[in-house]
Image (cartoon, rainbow, N blue to C red):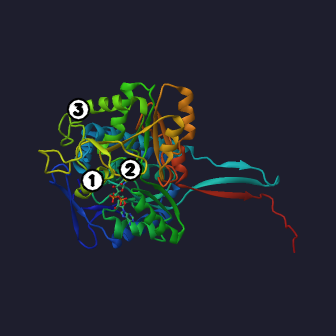
Amino acid sequence: MNTGRMFIGGEWVDSCSGQMRSITDPANQQLINRVPEADQDDVNRAIAAARTAFDKGPWRQTTAQDRGKILFAVGQKIRERAVELAELEVKNCGKPLAEAQFDIQDAANCFEFYGGLATKIHGETMSVPADSLSFVLREPIGVCGQIIPWNYPLVMAAWKLAPALAAGNTCVLKPSELTPLTALELAKIFCEVELPPGVVNVVTGPGPGCGEVLASSPFVDKVAFTGGTATGQKVMAGVAKELKRISLELGGKSPNIVFADADREAAVDGALFAAFANQGEVCSAGSRLLVEESIHREFIAQMLAKIPKIKLGHGLIAGTKMGPLISYAQLEKVESYVKIGVEEGAKLLCGGKRPKGLEAGFFFEPTIFDGVTPKMRIAREEIFGPVLSILTFKDEAEAIAMANDTEYGLAAGVWTKDIHRSLRLVRGLRAGIVWVNAYHPTYNELPWGGYKKSGLGRELGLHGIEEYLETKQVNFHGDPAPINWY
Ligand code: TXE
């Protein structure tokens, strides 16, 4: 590994300031590696490299077939190194190994999906006016600044880079300052597949001073951001100064709705997985469980019976089902919400505290609140940890109203055997992703993104590449004649 360097203009470089940041394992706070602490000079250096690669480099002249081949090769190399990458992801962001293994394959799939899509970027032709040939060209936007979070480091890098490169853009990727390690390994893979210098740059540094510069630089043409809604608003304000393209994938408080007729076992499992996968540090987490009143007590008992199976520990230890939170700050945030929930009058059914014996890491027990009402803060605000709020409803209309009573609109889950009801729910829910009798499956082929304050634009699928393409109208007159206007 290129320890202690970041990747700019095809080279492994130190930060201009010489500052370094220690990257630690959130399960035990042990040092894993040290990376350069970039500042605005480094970001500007990376932007300049991406600018040159776009304006003067060979990348735009590369055929779609060749871009596709490069992306397939990246996917293949990720697969070859899957074991090592999964372990690194576990150490850096805390998730259980099985989840990291899934992420690594998902990242490889993403590069392969967009590798295939590179050759399917089509324009349109029409004849307006009749003596001209008019057509629509799709072109890359230019330099893309891509800012990603710490909960799915390699997957988020893939979601951003793969469509951008398929479309012929150049990129400056800024991973979270907490989790830069798999993004740096990805840069190493880009070197191995001989991506031209400057096409992808990876800058390791903090949001303020680094992400901010990407957002506001006049030399960046498009910004793609995944992170908290408040930070997304700041990024958008930076982008507004230059009026550049933007896509945002932000927070959520997603409802997971269980009707009395649902397959009970599947729904219980689904409710727990929705809330506690990846320690609940998931933008689409089903953090609000809406249960039909008639089955409420039974459903809770069934959920609680399964809680002891959620084994906490280091993600690399066999059998671990939940790892630590990403940082002490996140642990404190989660704890503060438990306090708020108790003060608001919700009933703490389980968890609510740090587990004994795991004090070296940022662990928090799976936590369930019952008796939550729609106005409580624990029903409205994104906690981003293993805290589930349970609310009850009497009928379908109330379930839909309660589900939509949020400023977010990323995802929603519905559990019922009644197909007519499920279709009414699909239409009634104001969210970008709706799962019926499932929660969390995500496919590279399908668009991902939110309504309302959960974001702008879509990632993945055919929609995802649209975010990285400009549209040019061409009116081609082959046989010019004066129009004699003057
Ligand atoms: O995220 P930030 P934080 C939510 C979640 C969490 C909260 C805070 O609720 O508790 O956000 O987490 C970069 N200009 N999500 O503070 O700040 C930062 O360096 C430009 C939801 O860690 O959103 C990192 O690379 N960039 C989310 C990225 O933004 C800035 C995933 C995300 O960090 C910046 C993570 C700035 N001013 C947190 N400030 C999801 N939707 O999945 C920070 N950054």
Instruction: State yes or no: Cβ of the residue under disc 3 lies below 8 Å from any atom of ligand 1.
Output: no
Tell me the kind of residue under disc 1.
Answer: Lys
Q: CA distance from mark 3 to mark 2?
A: 29 Å
Q: Residue at x 48, y 68 (%)?
A: 237
Residue 481 left/right relative to 324: right
Number of disc labels: 3
For the residue labelled by badge 2, is the local secondary structure a helix, a strand or a loop?
helix
For the residue labelled by badge 1, is the local secondary structure a helix, a strand or a loop?
helix
Q: CA distance from mark 3 to mark 1?
A: 25 Å
**Around disc 3, counting alpha carbons within 10 Å, would you say few (fewer than 14), some (14 to 19), or many (20 or more)?**
few
Residue 156 is labelled as 2
For the residue labelled by badge 3, is the local secondary structure a helix, a strand or a loop?
helix
Residue at the left extreme of this rendering: 357
Is residue 161 visible to the viewer in this orientation of the structure? no
Sequence order check: which comes first, mark 1 or mark 2? Answer: 2
Between disc 3 and disc 2, the foreground one is 3
Sequence order check: which comes first, mark 3 or mark 2? Answer: 2
Q: Which residue is mark 3?
A: 309
Sequence order check: which comes first, mark 3 or mark 1? Answer: 3
Query: Contact (CB < 8 A) between labels 1 and 2?
Result: no
User: Residue 100: horizontal and vertical position, in percent?
Assistant: 29, 41
**Around disc 2, counting alpha carbons within 10 Å, would you say few (fewer than 14), some (14 to 19), or many (20 or more)?**
many
Where ligand 1 lies, by image quadrant? Answer: bottom left
Q: Which residue is mark 1?
A: 339
User: Residue 474: horizontal and vertical position, in percent?
Assistant: 69, 58
In the displayed structure, would residue 467 be above or below residue 425? below
Q: CA distance from mark 1 to mark 2?
A: 32 Å
Tell me the kind of residue under disc 3.
Answer: Lys
**Around disc 1, counting alpha carbons within 10 Å, would you say few (fewer than 14), some (14 to 19), or many (20 or more)?**
few
- Of residue 327 and residue 98, the one placed in the foreground of this image is 327
